[in-house]
Image (tube, helix red, strand yellow):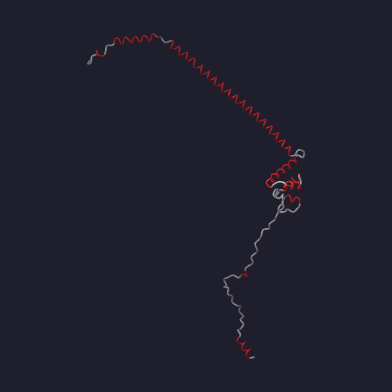
Amino acid sequence: MESSEANSSTSFPLSSSPPTSSVSPLTPRLSSLPPTPPPLMSPVVLSPCAACKILRRRCVDKCVLAPYFPPTEPLKFTIAHRVFGASNIIKFLQELPESQRADAVSSMVYEANARIRDPVYGCAGAICQLQKQVSELQAQLAKAQAELVNMQMQHADLVALICVEMTHSNSNHQLPLLSQSSDAFNGINPHLFANDYSSLVDDTNNACPMWELPLWT
């Protein structure tokens, strides 16, 4: 009993103060911070292509129609499906290489539009109409070229006529001048030249030689 009392007397007294923590008071406690929300992941929504959406079927990853009928162009597949049908379009695309499928889809959509506008002739009617316009334009072009050649010939004839008229007018102006000059030459008395020459000869004969002249006056 005494040993137990001694042990109880030597035990540490209980303290009412909370135990001191090794963390400094300036450090924020992690428990007081709000939990960080997880990063929001944008959900990836795979929209079916226009063909599968119209046909009301699941659009698989390797859908043959998806690259050529996007969901933003539903009218494109509606027109082609109305004329050719979905099964024929799929079969036709599967028989072609991938490098030619885009052109084939464009051709089918064009043919379907033409067939809807003209159920009898379809695309052939549009081709015939375009060929008719080409023939009319070619005829108009040939007519314009013929008129151009005719105008060029008329212009050449006019230039030649103007040159002939100018040469005739120049020759007519030169003939009166030549006749006037000949008439003036014919009107001069030739004896005038003879008298003057004779007077010059007489003067030279009557003149005394230089050695007979006196040196000093």
**Tally of numbered tags:** 0
As displayed, is residue 59 above or below residue 180?
below
Instruction: State which quadrant residue 127 falls in.
Output: top right
Residue 51: x percent and y percent? 73, 49
**Which residue lies most toward the right here?**
120
Q: Which is nearer the eye, 107 or 13?
A: 107
* Rendered location of residue 59, percent (x, y): 73, 53
Q: Which quadrant of the structure image shows residue 34?
A: bottom right
Residue 47 located left or right of residue 169: right
Relative to 61, residue 163 above or below:
above
Quadrant of the rendering where the N terminus is positioned: bottom right
**x then y, percent, for residue 8:** 62, 87
User: Where 216 falls versus 49 (above or below)?
Assistant: above
Which of the pair 152/66 is nearer the observer?
66
Figure quadrant of residue 158: top right
Extreme residue toward the left, this view:
216
Image position, residue 169 (x, y; %) = 52, 18
Given the current orientation, which residue lies at the most extreme bottom position? 2
In the foreground, 168 or 176: 168
**Image quadrant for the C terminus?**
top left
